[in-house]
Image: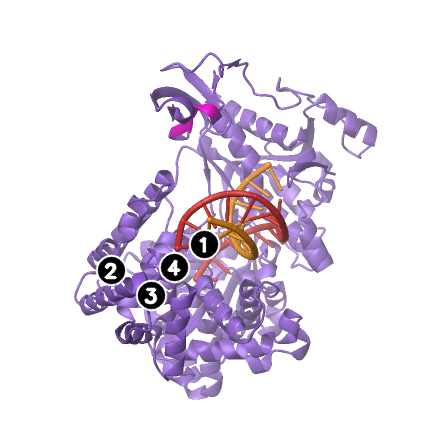
Chain colours: A purple, B red, C orange
Amino acid sequence: MTYLDRLNPPQKQAVQTTDGAVLVLAGAGTGKTSVLTSRLAYILMQGFAMPNQVLAVTFTNKAAREMTERVEDLLQRPAAGMWMGTFHALAARILRRHAELVNRDSNFTILDMDDQARLLKQILADRGIDEKQHPAKTLVHIISSWKDNGWLPEEVPTDHAGKFAGGRAIELYREYQARLERLNACDFGDLLLLNLVVWKRYPDIAARYQQQFKYILVDEYQDTNVVQYLWLRMLAMGHGNICVVGDDDQSIYGWRGAQVGNILRFEKDYPGAAVIRLEQNYRSTGHILNAAASLIAHNENRHDKTLWTEDDHGKPVEIHTTWDDREEARIVAGEVEAHVSKGGSYADCAILVRAAAQTRSFEEQFVQQAIPYQVVGGLKFYERKEIRDALAYLRLAAVPQDDLALERIINTPKRGVGDGALNTIRDRSRGLLQTSLFEALELCVNEGAITGKAKTNLQDFVAMLKGWQLLVRDWPPSQLMEKILEESGYVQMLQEDKNKEEAKGRLDNLKELVRAMEEYDDVPSFLEHVSLVMDVEPEENQRAVMMMTVHAAKGLEFDTVFLPGFEEGLFPHQRSLNETGEKGLEEERRLAYVAITRARRRLVILHASSRRLYGSYQPSMPSRFLAELPDDSIEYIQNTTAAMRTWGAGGQGGYGSGYGARRSNAPLFGSAPIEMDDMAEQGYELGSRVFHDKFGYGRIKRFEGEGNARKIIVAFEKAGEKKLLASLANLRVA
DNA sequence: GACCAACCGATTTTT
DNA sequence: TCGGTTGGTC
């Protein structure tokens, strides 16, 4: 059993304690995933359970994929039959089997945020509630958080009614649920909540699952919310073979319902639970672990654990004081270049920020210096407009009753359908019981209730949809999608788009979508995949500095980590302090802990004395977290005379040690790094190397047009080829 | 329905 | 500062 030999004693214990409740407190970098996967393999190899008797739950699809792969590696065979997946995927799988008990068909659709907002918008309009004062998006959040808390409309405590629409949110929630039923739809929250409802109302069904899942394994338990907690507790009732793995110090999702309390309370929930601590860290150097430990020790409510390493101390954590955020970016860029010139790789480095907007100054600086970087996160593939539109078409082909999909694309591409026509159709649909928008649309068109351009366009539209609906069962999804995109005029719309650059990107995305669909045999299974898996594994750039939020970095590790913006108000973030006070501060501290523990060999923390915020410069004080780091594991570095003046005079403890003053020859007030001739008057020359503030360096390839419309086509080294208006280009000779 | 000016707001984000 | 949304105009 070589895979067991690779584990240290507590890890082995966590794998082999199979009976009863087990809490594995897995500190950062302590080999959590090995334990999880080995435990699953162990249970199966020992014959304690059949694959379908094991339930393994994760939060993200990425984690689920990784777990599946690694278990298959250990077992040397496919993990077929195992219930491995995200909370939502597993709950959906179960709920579909019992959908009729919550007034739905087993093929119910799963709504995303967009759909939810669309539906709530209608409800608000019907009730005459002003959407400007009470935005549908806000209500989506309110209802989602109630569902996360496990509350049906009648279970929402009245003191949680809030002030949305004068306290009518609960009533709106009730109406929303009724409409979901009529639409044969569930939102994400429903998947778990309604699953739980089924189990509560039909104990015999619950008992079936309790017996089936002999072993339950939960990853990232510190991030579970109330419904997830109740869902798990229901399943574990009886045998109580539940093993949860997590680290309360890394709970950073309180703002979306995660209850650290779940992991802190585990031993009370499951009396006699075994508690196993994984404390040997295999990731970071001693100094980095010291810094992390010292910081997190300032939190009150936590399971005490101390990470240690057999590794050496390594370099002390560097703390840079800079003049402003631009200098901060210059210094990081300089350090990155120094690292690469010593033979390191760009991909060893990561910049982790508290707020996504912080990446801006880094991107600007990196573009200028032609340092390759990749921003991780942002809009997910399936959240892009063109993808959602395409999917709405597909949904409508598969399920003509999908009113929300119809509303989405009835006028995309433009068919001359405005509010007027749409309302006519809506009214018609509402007037007749059990009539979908699509059916109503057909009636309206045939009866001549719609006139003008919209009429002929919609006639074609209906005919097209009917055609696709006939093909949906027999055609491969990817081919049907291609046909739809062509026939609907969507592709043409993009080809004619004035914004060529963007339209091209969108067309590429659609191609990517079609390609992704080739793996699926039928449309419904593809749609199920899409609604539950909002991410697509991004192509990782092996040669670029990674930039992302600390949240997005959870679970990752890098050789060198830069943590800019350690300032009061930013990290800890002011809003967190304002909204949840001490609790918020503790979560911010955990976030900083996560950030620090991402580093393997080198950690550089920065804070600026002045930061651009909403356009203007704001003075910033160093983060209180800096003062919570241990003196003997850190080294202060000041970068400008100005900063020295500030901190030297300010008498900040630990600051102003004068170590390694101003090492870069960067100008204090961020003028362009290289002297350039202003060439606006002399005109641009073909082939000359130029510099652009946004796109960086490039070479002039050709010209187009004359006079005011004269354009310059420049091949930028980083940003690719761009067409610029000569009068506005503001290029300088490099 | 397209276009543009004015306006507002601005952590973190998965499923 | 910037970008997304809205309201007015044609």
Label 2: chain letter: A
Queried whether the magenta region covers residue A726, the answer comes back as: yes
Label 3: chain letter: A
* Left-right relation of A109 to A272: left
The structure residue drawn at horizontal position 49% and vertical position 23%, both measured from the top left corner, is A730
Image spot of residue A717 (x, y percent): 40, 25
The three-letter amino acid code for the residue at tag 3 is Glu
Instruction: Tell me if residue A542 comes above or below residue A520 in the rendering.
Output: above
Q: Please name the residue that numbered disc 1 is placed on.
A: A33
Q: Quadrant of residue A650?
A: top right
Q: Please name the residue that numbered disc 2 is placed on.
A: A520
Q: Residues within 10 Å of mark 2 (few under 14, many from 20)?
A: some
Pointers 3 and 4 within a single chain:
yes
Nearer the camera: disc 1 or disc 3:
3
- Say which label, 2 or 4, has the lower sequence index: 2
Q: Is residue A427 visible?
A: yes
User: Judging from the image, what secondary structure is the residue with disc 1 in?
Assistant: helix
Label 1: chain letter: A
Nearer the camera: disc 4 or disc 1:
4
Q: Quadrant of residue A481?
A: bottom left
User: Judging from the image, what secondary structure is the residue with disc 4 in?
Assistant: loop
User: Judging from the image, what secondary structure is the residue with disc 3 in?
Assistant: helix
- Say which label, 4 or 1, has the lower sequence index: 1
Which circle marks residue A533 in the picture? Answer: 4
The kind of secondary structure the magenta stretch mainly shows is strand
Image spot of residue A60 (x, y percent): 44, 58
As measured in the structure, the alpha-carbon distance from the residue carrying label 2 to the one carrying label 3 is: 11 Å
The three-letter amino acid code for the residue at tag 4 is Val
The three-letter amino acid code for the residue at tag 2 is Tyr
The residue stretch that appears in magenta: A722-727
Instruction: Tell me if residue A98 comes above or below residue A482 in the rendering.
Output: below
Pointers 4 and 1 within a single chain:
yes
